[in-house]
Image (cartoon, helix red, strand yellow):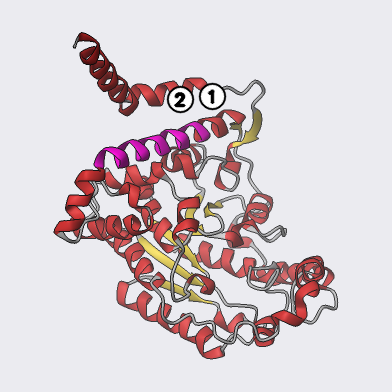
Amino acid sequence: MRRVAALLAGTVLSIGLFLSPAADLAVHALTTVKHPEQRSVRVLNYESPGHREDTVRLYRQAMAGEPEGVTNLYVMGSSELGVPIDQNPRVWLPTNASDFDMYESGRGNQQSLYHAVELAAVGPSIATKRVALILSPQWFVPGGEKASLFQSVFSHAAWNAMLANPHLSARTRSRLVARVGSLVPQLCTLGASCATTTANAVEEVVNAPYNVLTSRMNTLRDAYKGAEYRKAVTYTGPWRPGKQPMATIDWAAEDAKAVATGRARVGKNPYNMENSYYAAKIVPQLAKLKGQQRSVTFTSSVEYHDLQLYLDVAHDLGIQVLLIALPVNGVWSDFTGLPKAQRDGFSAKVRTMAAVNGAQLVDLSSKAYEPYYFFDTLHLGWRGWLDVTRACWTFASS
């Protein structure tokens, strides 16, 4: 009997330690890096390893390192943030701008729902009360985001910070919890119930121990990765200003540079995309891609519900939003058969949502056939990124 009692006591103690702050301290202590790389603190805006695992702390660190007089805009998006061109803000701004940065948050498969959770987590730390969200049309497919892809980019740190945000309305919080819970059921616990029926509530009670321990394990795993990333790079160098204030940028001259670079990298391929990408990714399967998008729709999607959640979070937190609606590569879309009605329908629906929610909108759909606007079939290129950077600056400085 004593052995059973001792076993139970040991189990309870172990679980208690696992759930306590002591486990977080232990995880941090276990991560070691012998020779951390030294970087300028400005790099935190663009190259912040561990951002997903440590959303709030890294943003605060970046803001603490910026000198007075520098304007910063929190910009959320997805894979377009990684396009390898000189006009990408992560290259262009540190080189050119002495008074503006975009704190970039996003990677492939992070869409409206993920960014809604992230905004609810980091919103109280955004002193400017302004954010921009770059919307890609391909997010807005009928089924919305797949659970497996959402889970692959989900942040437990952001989730916990969202739950702890007292400024989030009960209605927004419950809708956000239910929607995320539909994709990550392990998050549905008594403290963050996703239940819509009595049966669901009973199921949550039964699954609560497993879900709590699973969620905690994932949180500690992310904390370990975040600590490992943080220790690998030490951001101690000074914030390095670019050449001039944004107000003095000659945008016509910058566009001319973008055109020249784009012309050199696109070459003679007929679909307005970077030539090495075209040769490696498109040419081998060109024949089977013809007409492949005839049935694609962008006008009926749960993604619009997720975008509304994002806008509701912003409303609760008193944050002004700039929505940037990206176009698709028009020449390529004509080849694949993507209906123009769907392209136009996407921008029309976003336009309506922006107006209803009091958000600002930059609609770039008219740029679909602009030369050197795209890097590939859909990601922003040389001229495209210049337009987005300029729009962000205008919004942030107004």
Q: Along the horizontal axis of the image, is 147 left or right of 319?
A: right
User: What amino acid does circle 1 point to?
Assistant: Thr
- Residue 391 shows in the view: yes
Q: Is residue 34 magenta?
A: no
Using the rendered image of the protein, determine whether residue 190 is visible from the camera's viewpoint. Answer: no
Amino acid carrying label 2: it is Val
The answer to whether residue 245 is left or right of residue 317 is right
Residue annotated with mark 2: 27
CA neighbours of label 1 inside 10 A, class few (<14), some (14 to 19), many (20+): some
Closer to us: 122 or 130: 122
Residue range of the region highlighted in magenta in the rendering: 208-225
- What secondary structure is marked by label 2? helix
* Residue 338 picture location, percent across and down: 59, 85
Which residue matches tag 1? 31
Question: Residue 328 at x, y = what percent?
Answer: 60, 77
Q: Residues within 10 Å of mark 2 (few under 14, many from 20)?
A: some
| Residue sitting at x 23%, y 16% | 9
Figure quadrant of the C terminus: bottom left
Residue under the image location 43 percent in, 21 percent down: 26
Q: Residue at x 55, y 52 (%)?
A: 101
